C-alpha cells in the first residue's frame, strides 16, 4: 500500500533512506534545514517542502533522521499539533533512551502513535536499502511501519516498548566499541611478541576470539581486504559516531547505576580519539592510538 510520508532530516542517512521510499512507490514530502540536502533529495524524487509542519500535515507516517535527541524533541514540539489524527511518528535517529521515551510520551499526549527505530548499517546500508532497524513501541505500530522499514532495510526487529530500539542500538554499539579496542590491543600485543597479523587473524577468526570487529572490520591492513584499514582508515563507521553512541551508552549506564566498567572506559577512549580524527577516520583506526600509547610507554 502506497503511503504519504513526511521525511524530516535528509542528511547522509536520511537522504538515501527517503530515496528508497520513493523507489518503493511511496509519496515522500521531505524537509531539511540544509538547502543542499533538500535539493539532493528532490533529485531522487522527494517532494521538497519548506517547513516540517507543512510536510507533517499531509502525512500518514512521519519519519525523522536527525542528529540528536534535542532535534527530535524540538521537531515533535513543533509539529505534533499539525499532524493528522492517527498519524504514526517513526524516529530513526540515534538518540538517548530517555529522550526517545519523552518523544513517545509527547506523541501519546497529542493522541498520536510512535516508534523509535534507530538503524545500523551506515551510509552504505542506507543507500543499498540494507539497514537493520531496531524498533521500540507497540506491536501494532511496528506492524504498520514494517513495509516502510522493509523498503529501507533488510532486517527489522521489534525490541519491545518505547525506547527499546534505542536501548538495543546503544547496547550493540557498546559491544562493538569494546570489542574493537580488544581486537586492536591484541594485534598490538601480537606485534610486540613478533606475531604476524595474518597468523593472529587465522587463529582468532576461527577460534573463540572471533567477532565482527576482527572478521569484518579488521583494524590492521591485510587479513580482511575490504576493511577500512586497507584504505588508510577512511570510514566505514566514523570515529565520531562511535564516540556519540558510546557517550549515550555511558550516560545510560551512569543513570541506571550499571557498573559497565569497560563501556565507560571505551567511551572515554573513543571521545579522546574522535576529538582528534572526527568523521575523517573509521573507528577501527583506534588501533593506531593503541600502538602509539604502547610506544609512549616503552
Ligand atoms: P547528517 O548530519 O548527515 O544529517 C542530519 C540532517 O538533519 C542534516 O541534513 C541537517 O540539516 C538536518 N536537520 C537538523 N536539524 C533539523 C531540523 N530541525 N529540521 C530539519 N532538518 C534538520 O547525519 P546522519 O549521518 O544522516 O545521521 C543522522 C542520524 O543517524 C544520527 O542520529 C546518527 O547518529 C544516526 N546514524 C548515522 C549513521 C551513519 O553512518 N552516518 C549510522 C547509523 C545511525
Image (tube, rainbow, N blue to C red):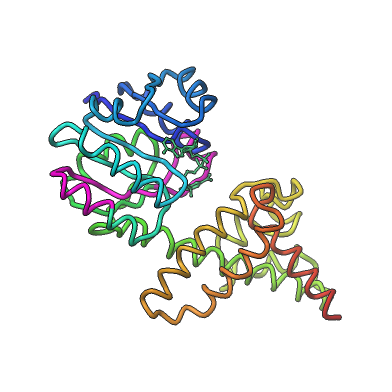
Query: Looking at the figure, which quarter contains the C terminus?
Result: bottom right
Q: Nearer the viewer, residue 193 or 129?
A: 129
Magenta span includes 168: no
Which span of residues is magenta-colored? 103-132
Q: Is residue 28 left or right of residue 36?
A: left
Point out residue 293 in the picture as x, y percentages from the top left corner: 78, 73
Identify which residue is drawn at 36% across, 76% down: 256
Q: Residue at x 41, y 41 (%)?
A: 65
Direction from residue 275 to residue 38 in the image, left or right: left
- How far across and how far down the image is residue 115, in percent? 26, 48
Out of 275 and 192, give the one closest to the viewer: 275
**Is residue 142 depicted above or below 10 in this figure?**
below
Residue 279 point in image, percent of width and height: 64, 48
Q: Position of residue 272 (x, y in %)?
A: 66, 65
Residue at x 23%, y 24% (from the top left corner) = 58
Q: Nearer the viewer, residue 296 or 209?
A: 296
How many marks the image carries: the answer is: 0
**Viewed as shown, does residue 71 lie left or right of 90?**
right
Tell me the quarter of the picture where residue 200 sits: bottom right
Residue visible at 30% across and 26% down in the picture: 55
Looking at the figure, which quarter contains the N terminus?
Answer: top left
In this picture, is 249 found above or below 102? below
- Asked if the stretch drawn in magenta spans residue 127, the answer is yes
Amino acid at each position: 500500500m502506497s503511503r504519504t510520508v513526511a521525511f524530516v532530516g535528509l542528511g547522509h542517512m536520511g537522504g538515501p533512506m527517503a530515496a528508497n521510499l520513493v523507489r518503493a512507490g511511496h509519496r515522500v514530502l521531505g524537509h531539511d534545514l540544509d538547502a543542499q540536502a533538500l535539493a539532493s533529495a528532490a533529485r531522487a524524487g522527494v517532494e521538497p517542502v519548506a517547513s516540517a509542519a507543512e510536510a507533517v500535515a499531509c502525512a500518514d507516517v512521519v519519519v525523522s533522521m536527525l542528529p540528536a535527541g534535542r532535534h527530535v524533541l524540538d521537531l515533535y514540539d513543533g509539529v505534533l499539533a499539525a499532524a493528522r489524527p492517527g498519524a504514526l511518528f517513526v524516529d530513526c535517529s540515534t538518540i538517548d533512551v530517555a529522550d526517545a521515551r519523552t518523544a513517545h510520551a509527547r506523541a501519546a499526549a497529542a493522541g498520536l502513535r510512535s516508534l523509535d527505530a534507530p538503524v545500523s548499517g551506515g551510509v552504505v546500508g542506507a543507500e543499498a536499502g540494507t539497514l537493520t532497524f531496531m524498533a521500540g513501541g507497540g506491536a501494532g505500530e511496528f506492524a504498520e511501519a514494517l513495509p516502510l522499514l522493509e523498503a529501507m532495510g533488510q532486517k527489522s526487529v521489534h525490541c519491545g516498548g518505547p525506547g527499546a530500539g534505542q536501548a538495543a542500538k546503544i547496547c550493540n554499539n557498546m559491544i562493538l566499541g569494546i570489542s574493537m579496542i580488544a581486537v586492536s590491543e591484541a594485534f598490538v600485543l601480537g606485534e610486540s611478541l613478533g606475531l604476524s597479523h595474518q597468523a593472529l587473524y587465522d587463529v582468532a577468526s576461527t577460534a573463540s576470539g572471533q567477532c565482527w570487529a576482527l572478521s569484518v572490520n579488521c583494524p590492521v591492513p591485510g587479513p580482511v581486504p575490504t576493511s577500512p584499514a586497507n584504505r588508510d582508515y577512511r570510514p566505514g563507521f566514523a570515529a565520531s559516531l562511535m564516540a556519540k553512541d558510546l557517550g549515550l551508552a555511558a550516560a545510560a549506564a551512569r543513570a541506571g547505576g550499571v557498573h559497565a566498567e569497560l563501556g565507560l572506559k571505551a567511551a572515554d577512549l573513543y571521545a579522546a580519539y574522535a576529538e582528534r580524527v572526527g568523521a575523517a577516520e573509521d573507528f577501527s583506526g583506534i588501533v593506531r592510538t593503541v600502538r602509539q600509547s604502547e610506544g609512549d610507554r616503552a
